[in-house]
Image (spheres, rainbow, N blue to C red):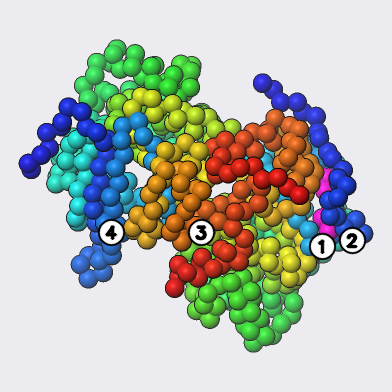
Amino acid sequence: MSSNTPSDKPSSALEISDLDVHYGPRRRRRQALRGVSLTVAPGETVGLIGETGSGKSTLARTVLGLVPATAGSIVVGGEDVTTYGRRRWRALRRRGVVQYVFQDPLRSLDPDLTVEESLSEPLLVRGVPRAEAAGRIRAHLDRVRLTEELLGRLPGALSGGQRQRVAVARALVTEPRVLILDEPVSALDSANRVQILEILKNLRADGVALVLISHDLGSVAGVADRIAVLYRGELVETGTAHDIVTNPQHPYTRLLLGSAPTLHGAPADRAERQALRALLHA
Amino acid sequence: MTPPTTQHTRSEQPGTATEPTAAPVLSVRDVHITDRASGREIVHGVSFDLTPGRTVGIVGESGSGKTLTCRAALGILPPHFEVTAGSIEIAGTDITTLTPARWTALRATTISAVFQDPASYLNPSIRVGAQIAEVLRVKTGLTRREARDRTLELLRAVHLRDPELVRVQYPHELSGGMLQRVLIAAAIAAGPRILIADEATTALDVTVQAEILDLLADLRERTGLALVVVSHDLAVVAQLCDEVLVLRHGEVVEQGPVRSVLHDPRHDYTRLLIAEHEQYGLERFRPAKEHA
């Protein structure tokens, strides 16, 4: 309880140090994350890459206070939140310091609320007057390239790409320091992919720290400054997107890159992939 | 920015390896598919020929008509949908002449398919080995014991690590990648000549996707299987296919050998599919490779 006063200018938006997370009752306790350390600066975009069961969703849930950490610390916008109880976490989430966008935007959006209601809700619960909220959400629509005429629609009347952009706008209205997106493009077709990636790129200038979670390095490599590779609960490699793609060190990163289909021939051939798989399973 | 709707079809370019002599096992000729309920035509003319050991790729977003085209070739179009023009021939037989009984005989033994969600094609309360064995007994007339032995061979052929164990497991005990292998094993059990893989790797992790694509390439080389690979991702198709069709709103906007489509795309939509990889994907970090 010593140092949770927010400093004036935090150098990092999110600082995770030596994080351990366990699941399950004592007898069958399993470790989901082991010694994970990751720092994201304001305006920086980090791609968090891992396969099913690697712990990437657990990491996101821990940063949102939905799963307790068993060791290590989490500092959000200069505020040490590691020892926060349920109530303080809830208050923190209500302030919208950290926001999360689900892979399936239908899960982030209430199907019975119009776009306008969905976008205003996070502001109204914080006590922002209705008229002011209406003005503020319009400013955010522009950031995600949506027009005002969509405000009266229900999520069901939007295309997949529009829904995803509404979900991003809803996360942005509380001016979060950290925005975590789970598989931001994997459910979208090419045209919408490119559009969402462009929108995310532009958020950098606003100082939002972005964490893009994906199983597919290729889908976020184009907009991420840095890549962190999570494998079996551990960060096995972290580096600039360029270094990770052109000079991967860990066998899993090499397998990941060697597996990603590319237009002009795979960087690794079948035999190389087999050798890497054998190495990892040894 | 409305893309032109003209179709760019190229003939095989000189120097491209082709086998014009082999007879096609699947021949799709100007197929149109209409939704009878609404009276709307959904697929506006798809054509391709598939010869043994070759692979045709169909790329397009959801709703482009790629799955309908596949289902037409399998004779399993949803209710209301109908092939209203053009023809499909499987191993020389026009499918409009097929009775339900002939269709049943043809499926699995000549044409087979795997789809995106393997779990929904397996019975959750029957061990996976028994489900593959059933295909073998019904389609190839093997005895129980023969079917059991052959099932093990098939599970081994799709590179499952512990075939004896997998054989007696239930679908819920297996991962998505393992289930897709089981489905492929069932699909190839009766030795089909054509395998349609419709978004078969879309729901899988990238490393598992590569394993499944490697497996399909392996089967094609070993058995001369002809593949139709359907994906929303041009790179998946580029990795495996000889010829590619780009489908948009039911229309083939581009068609030709993969290499020439990649190097000289004629349609805006194809350019978008390429840009997605070159500007936002891994290709961004790699110098463009010149092909020989």
Please identify the dominant SS of the magenta region.
Answer: strand
**Residue A156 visible within the image:** no
Residue on which the image places disc 3: A255
- Secondary structure found at label 1: loop
Q: CA distance from mark 2 to mark 4?
A: 56 Å
Task: Give me the residue at 17% from left, 36% from top.
Answer: A79
> Which chain hosts label 3?
A
Q: Position of residue A77 (x, y in %)?
A: 23, 34
Badge 1 amino acid: Pro
Label 3: few (<14), some (14–19) or many (≥20) C-alpha neighbours in 10 Å: many
> Is label 3 on the same chain as label 4?
yes
The part of the chain drawn in magenta is B47-51
Asked whether disc 2 touches disc 1, contact meaning CB atoms under 8 Å apart, the reply is yes
Q: CA distance from mark 1 to mark 3?
A: 31 Å
Along the line of sight, the residue nearer the viewer: B73 or B228: B228
Label 1: few (<14), some (14–19) or many (≥20) C-alpha neighbours in 10 Å: many
Badge 4 amino acid: Arg
Mark 2, mark 3: which one is toward the viewer? Answer: 3
Query: Is A255 left or right of B38, judged from the image as shown?
Result: left
Q: Which mark is residue B52?
A: 1
- Secondary structure found at label 2: loop
Asked whether disc 4 touches disc 1, contact meaning CB atoms under 8 Å apart, the reply is no
Asked whether disc 3 touches disc 4, contact meaning CB atoms under 8 Å apart, the reply is no
Residue on which the image places disc 4: A34
Residue on which the image places disc 2: B22
Label 4: few (<14), some (14–19) or many (≥20) C-alpha neighbours in 10 Å: some
